[in-house]
Image (cartoon, rainbow, N blue to C red):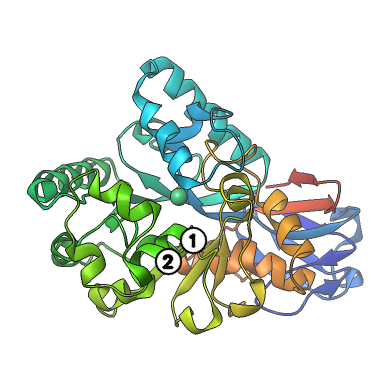
Amino acid sequence: MRFLTADYLFPLYIAPIKEGVLQISDDGQVIAIFKNRREVPQDKLEIFEGILCPGFVNAHCHLELSHLKGNAEKGKGFLEFSNIIRQRDSYTDTAKQQAIEKAEQEMIANGIVGVGDICNTSDTLEQKQKENLKYYNFIETFGVDVNKVYVVFNQAIELRNEFRAAGQKASIVPHAPYSVPPVLMQKINNAFDDNDELLTIHMQETKEENQLLENKKGPFFDWLNGMNATSSIWKNRDKSTDILQELGDKKVLLVHNTFAKKEDITDNYYCTCPRANLYIENDLPDYSIFDTNKLCVGTDSLASNNSLSILDELLIIQNNSNFDLNTLLKIACKNGAKALGFEHLGTFEKGKIPGVNLIKSMAENKITKLI
Ligand SMILES: [Zn+2]
């Protein structure tokens, strides 16, 4: 049994408490919160400098791409970046596994407790089975050629079943509005079952995506045509968010939204990956357009980021929005847990096992994982 206190406690389901105390069991379960240090046994009190908040939820990552760290040149745009991703298989299995393990350790050290992770392979499964972190696995489909949709979808079903058989949460999801034609969307919808909590999709990550769907031309139009893409992708959709109508009334987490406008925002959950946006597109979303109760944050992969640190991401958001610290921490903890259905994470509510982070200095990125 521990009684933890710092300059401020951020329970996130109630307002921050100056010198608040968190009572927590040895296995990390929240027992109670006290508004005054005098209410608890003084000899048991552990006093820290800084603030205490729950463990972070990284709502968007591609752990399997960790071995590509540093390969992509910054600011070259998405098409150049996708060429780098295509080199993913020219590495040994050992190199990939080592990079995955190291990346997970980095997330743990940075106070992350839950991850929404995109999977195109089962490369990460062995590491995830160690259950160091809580994962929601999104089995990604990318299938622009209708002749190959059947194969793409069946591979996704097989991969999803492999993850589920290993005790992992896994759902089949579309990659993006430009890479999944209506016929594949239909199959994804039909495969959605009681084990699925939500879908996620990359959304408005590039200017070229908007240009393709709104004007039916541009670099993405040429790129897709070069891959024998079906025109039903852009004929049936006049803007990125049109694909949401094909998803029915499911919970959806829309990722990136770098080029989203106020009128594009729906009642769904949104995830921002600011450092990846700066890395690839050298741009950021307009943070004033989001509902801060529905906004989450992700690191994206080490292929498009130098670190897997939610605190690093928060610093960028802080410098480019008017969000206060409590809002930033809600984005980093509570909202991601809600979006991904991690019921025991995200806040210091009684009974949860959310992890405890001590942030000594936000600007200097001084974070200690206490539990
Ligand atoms: Zn991504």
Mark 1 — residue?
207
The residue depicted at 47 percent of the width and 38 percent of the height is: 80
**x then y, percent, for residue 170:** 30, 52
Q: Amino acid at mark 1?
A: Lys
364 over 30 or under it: above or below: above
C-beta proximity under 8 Å, tags 1 and 2: yes
- Considering depth in this image, is 76 or 134 the residue closer to the camera? 76
Indicate the secondary structure of the residue bearing disc 1: helix
- Considering depth in this image, is 40 or 338 the residue closer to the camera? 338
Confirm whether residue 341 shows in the render.
Answer: no
The image quadrant of residue 185 is bottom left
What is the CA distance from the residue labelled 1 to the residue labelled 2?
5 Å
- Considering depth in this image, is 240 or 340 the residue closer to the camera? 240
Mark 2 — residue?
210
The residue depicted at 91 percent of the width and 53 percent of the height is: 49
Indicate the secondary structure of the residue bearing disc 2: helix
